[in-house]
Amino acid sequence: MTSLALTGIGALVTCDASIGLGPLGIVERGALVCEDGRVVYAGPEATAPLGVDECVDVAGRCVMPGFVDSHTHLIFAGDRAAEFVARMAGGTYEPGGILATVAATRAARPIGLEYSARKLMRLAVASGTTTVEIKTGYGLDREHEASHVALARRLTPEATFLGAHVVPPEFAGDRSGYVQLVCDAMIPAAAGVARWCDVFCEAGAFDVEESRAVLEAGRRHGLGLRVHANQLGPSGGVALACELGAASADHCTHLTASDVDDLASSGTVATLLPVSDFCTRQPYPDGRTLVDAGAVVALASNCNPGSSYSISMPLVMALAVRECGLTVDEAVLAATRGGAAALRRDDIGIFAPGARADALLLDAPHPQHLVYRLATPLVSRVLKDGTWTGPSAREPT
Ligand code: NIG
């Protein structure tokens, strides 16, 4: 058994309003005690059980749960900088651009894909992300998707099969043949390896009935459901996600009033990906309306080479506050507990007894500074499952 206590915490952000003050559940002069990778105490230092193997005085820093990034596409080769530059000059985002990454990814060596995905994960940790979901979706044939699902699973327990990202070129004249391949061969192969099945339900990708077939096949094979929904227009994806009980409807940029009602009254989390709206020059999703309606909102990076080549959750939070109408506290909760809810997890994104000891030490008095001091690296140390991790793992506090 190994145990660790963090003491001298200026503001301990528990993300549990029943433990501390305000929506973030803040305990001033707090302590966090972990045993075998789990939180055993989060509360005032004065009453903390401090008979532990290691005790670290964090010198007044703020300590908060690590970010939960519930939507990324980290398995890819190449980049699409030229597309980004063209969009910044007035061009539009087209789902067809995904095929350029499919070609580059199919041509890449598996070891190179793993190397670059791990590199992005190290950047994620450095900016405070301690849990990451990873989708496939740039293989789009049996062999590559199976290999990418296995890679995603090596990198995270939150591996998602996204064979229905777009129709690959070899099936250009046979959409239904590709949907059938996904449902009858690729999903059964992904089952037991991936945790989730996702579909890009959008004009230019898959329509509602094709998406329904994919999601129902995923469900038959024991996969949880996620949907890329209403990114470029009111695609019907949100209604489908809510109807099928998907864990999350992601993007939610173009919502009807009935989509908002569906999200508010279902267990489907509305996951906002505002860096993609920035990079595609789309309007931003209306997070304010979703929160006010009672929907659970998550924030995620959507890191991918086409629409959002950044893995920084502080940047996501800043855009969610400035452009989606969330308060800073709501953005912090959406990047932690919201992401956890989108992955149907209650052991991350929160400091409560039994939760994983995934913690960030901030060189700042409050998480507000992550948004306020835009693009400033404020995460000084990261704990993952109670162990120091990331570039500063061996630095003193
Ligand atoms: O979530 N929408 C579909 N998938 C990604 C884009 C992937 C790409 O353009 O390569 C997204 O934005």
Image (spheres, rainbow, N blue to C red):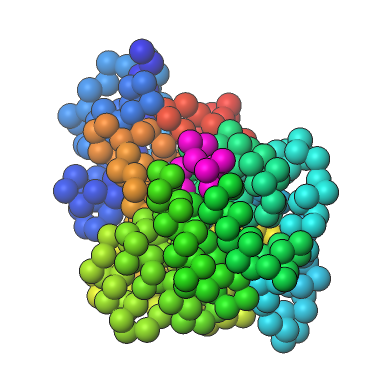
Is residue 5 something one can see in this rendering?
A: no
Near-viewer residue (373 or 290): 290
Query: What's the residue at 20%, 52% (across, down)?
Result: 17
Query: What's the residue at 58%, 47% (across, down)?
Result: 185
Near-viewer residue (261 or 337): 261
Residue 268, by quadrant, is bottom left
Query: What's the residue at 50%, 33% (across, down)?
Result: 397
Query: What's the residue at 78%, 50% (across, down)?
Result: 106
In the figure, is residue 337 to the left or right of 309? left
Near-viewer residue (315 or 273): 273
Q: Position of residue 359 (x, y in %)?
A: 41, 39
Q: Residue furthest bottom?
A: 90
Q: Position of residue 183 (x, y in %)?
A: 53, 54
Residue 338, by quadrant, is bottom left
Q: Magenta segment: does it hold 272?
A: no
Q: Position of residue 91 (x, y in %)?
A: 73, 84
Total number of numbered discs in the rendering: 0
In the figure, is residue 160 to the left or right of 257? right
Quarter the N terminus occupies: top left
Instruction: Indicate whether 295 appears above or below 68.
Output: below
Q: Magenta segment: does it hold 188?
A: yes
Instruction: Indicate whether 221 appears above or below 299.
Output: above
Is residue 160 something one can see in this rendering?
A: yes
Residue 346, by quadrant, is top left
Read off the magenta span: 187-196
Q: Position of residue 196 (x, y in %)?
A: 46, 48
